[in-house]
Image (cartoon, helix red, strand yellow):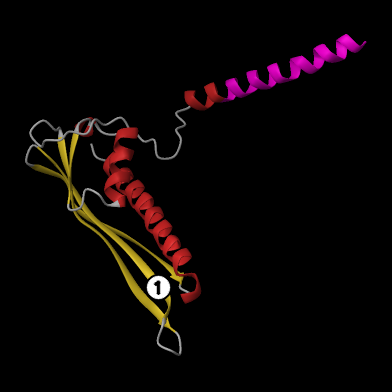
Amino acid sequence: MWSSERSAALRRPVSRWIAIAAGAVLAAGCGFRLAGTAPLPAVLARPHLSFSDPYSDFARIFGQQLRDAGATLESSDATATATVDVSRDSVEQRVLSVSARNIPTEYLLVYTVTYSVRHAGKELLAPQTIGLSQDYSFSEQAVLAKQHEADRLRRQMARELAAIAMRRIASLK
């Protein structure tokens, strides 16, 4: 009796893995894709990226998302199938409120990106401006923590802007 209970317990994980594998096959068969994995158009197989600031959070994240989508980034416009020109990539910090002693207590971060796509001298995507804003509180007693929070918010906004740009670029034909 003990051996039959043990063999039944060993079969449960196997049947669980079979059910998981079957679910994955069915999901893939119906065209399901994870978010952010839309295929790129053929014209963006080997894009050249032109940034106003190639070291910004958006530039690094956008380039990585293109590579993750299967694109091979070209260092030259001459060998590229298309050029993605990011003409504006800026982060602004504005004061939203101040204390009675005229010390800022709340800031607004505004991240704005303008980009366009060209192929063989023809504009495939006219300049698009996208932006996000996020407010955060500020405290003199926690300056380092608040700076870390602002950096984290800036990176998060860059990821979201890169995802928006990727969805718009993936819709090109």
Q: Residue at x 71, y 20 (%)?
A: 13
Q: Residue at x 58, y 21 (%)?
A: 21
Counting the numbered discs, the total is: 1
Q: Residue at x 20, y 52 (%)?
A: 53
Judge left or right: residue 52 versus residue 59.
left
Question: What residue did someone put label 1 on?
Answer: 107
Question: From which residue to which does the magenta span run?
Answer: 1-23
Q: Residue furthest right?
A: 1
Pinpoint residue 95: horizontal percent, then vertical percent.
Answer: 36, 77
Task: Inspect the image, locate mark 1, and give the three-letter code of the amino acid beneath it.
Answer: Tyr
Which quarter of the rendered picture does the C terminus lie within? top left
Judge left or right: residue 23 versus residue 88.
right
Instruction: Give the main secondary structure, helix, strand or loop, of the magenta stretch.
Output: helix
- Please determine whether, in this image, residue 64 is positioned above or below residue 105: above
Pinpoint residue 5: horizontal percent, then vertical percent.
Answer: 86, 15
Q: Residue at x 39, y 35 (%)?
A: 37
Pinpoint residue 67: horizontal percent, then vertical percent.
Answer: 30, 34
Residue 156 lies in what quarter of the image? Answer: bottom left
Say if residue 172 shows up in the picture. Answer: yes
Disc 1 is placed on an element classified as strand
Which quarter of the rendered picture does the N terminus lie within? top right
Pinpoint residue 168: horizontal percent, then vertical percent.
Answer: 29, 46
Magenta highlight on residue 57: no
